[in-house]
Image (cartoon, rainbow, N blue to C red):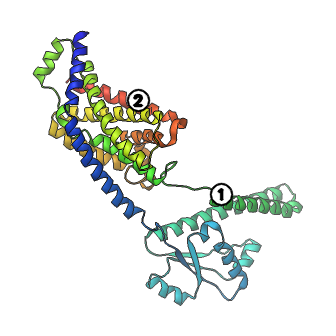
Amino acid sequence: MSQRLNYWRLEVKRAFFRLPQLAAGAVILTLFLGLTASFAGERLYGDSALGRITIGVILSGEDEQEKMLVQMLSHMESVESICDFQYMTEAEAEEAFRNHKIYGALYLPEGLIQGIINGSNPPIRVRLEGGGLENRIFKELTQAGARILGSAQAGIYAGDQLLHESEMEERIGQLEQDLNEIYINNSLNRENLFRETQVSATGDLSPLQFYGTSILILYLLLLSVPVSSYLKPESAVMAQKLKLLGIGAWTGTAAKLTGLWILMLIGGLLFFAAACWAGIFLWSPFALGILALLCLGTAAMALFIFEAAGNGMGGIILLFLGTVVLHLFSGGILPSVFLPNTVREISVFLPNAILMKGAGLLVLGPDQMAWCLPVAGLILFFYILTVGVRRR
């Protein structure tokens, strides 16, 4: 037992000798990641993420009812916030498309209003050109509107058919009136929801907080590069001598993990203090506990990578490439909502995504304590894997 404790103490002492390399690496990483984040933020979140979307409206004639319909549509909150409508002829619309002055066009058919009243519902032709962000946003708006209208019509038609089959045709008018009142109330609730509820691609975190947690995990993982000499696996001869002293893979892994965790914690505290000063995180005892857990998680992952690589240089290359690729697929560079569906479904199981989820507790506080469990499981997972690699 005394041999194991002495070895543990020596590993921690050996880790402290890497503090100068750690300090230099922490400064360089902070400057590099800070400048990268600043540049990316300027590129991704400039003065405005989305400009106004100009849509041409081609009327079938000089029908004032059609203009009233378009005016009502243009005053919906979700439409009014980003869309501008312009009345024009088909020839003017063609010229506007060629000159890139409009992103889409609505061609209103003749008898549109009467068709809505009598149930024939002539379709409105929607024309979109180009693959820009504005075009995709308008496409989403039109598809959402079509789905809402389709479900509303299906409700009315299903009710009418049910009353016909029940030989209660005299109640159809009252049914349609009641359904229309329900739809109008839902529409009003939708307008209130649009004004009061903010939906963000970064979930419960603001973009600044999201990228703060993302950079923190990236920083902690790459922080093991300056101290790579500490992480080099022992030679076969050294491993055999340690085994003769009763120090096996379990104890050796735990001792080295403790030393690396202390180094990570020192470097993480420097980053965390700077982030608190910048207003990204809030300083609290709970946040310090979460930071310690994250440092242990990143240390366990980094130690496994170096042990699996078999040497220092291989560990550095594998750690850097693996960290960047995993961070991209985990939604650490672009939020996961922008990733393909297949990648998004897999990303929740990636270690970087689990660590980033845990880092969100630095902002959200103890209300989401359940997020600590996957991080703890990740630590145990990498610890067992590292022991298995050391036993090769």
- Element under label 1? helix
Q: Quadrant of residue 175?
A: bottom right
Q: Do the residues labelled 1 and 2 touch (CB within 8 Å)?
A: no
Seen at 66% across and 88% down, the residue is: 61
Seen at 83% across and 57% down, the residue is: 163
> What is the x, y in percent for residue 80?
61, 71
Q: Is residue 156 left or right of residue 348?
A: right
34 is higher (above) or lower (below) than 121 = above
Q: How crowded is mark 1: few (under 14 residues within 10 Å), some or many (20 or more)?
A: few
- Give the mark nearer the N terminus: 1 vs 2: 1
> What is the x, y in percent for residue 331?
40, 49
Q: Which amino acid does label 1 sit on?
A: Leu
Q: In which quarter of the image is residue 8?
A: top left
Give me the C-alpha separation between circle 1 and circle 2.
Answer: 38 Å
Which quadrant of the figure contains the N terminus?
Answer: top left
Tell how many labels: 2
| The furthest residue to the right | 170
> What is the x, y in percent for residue 86?
58, 82
Which quadrant of the figure contains the C terminus?
Answer: top left
In depth, the one of 57 and 154 nearer the eye is 57
Any part of residue 52 in sight: yes
- In the drawing, what numbered circle is on residue 193? 1
Q: What residue type is labelled 2?
A: Gly
Any part of residue 227 in sight: no
- In the drawing, what numbered circle is on residue 343? none
- Element under label 2? helix
216 is higher (above) or lower (below) than 241 = below
Seen at 23% across and 21% down, the residue is: 252
On the image, numbered disc 2 is attached to which residue? 377
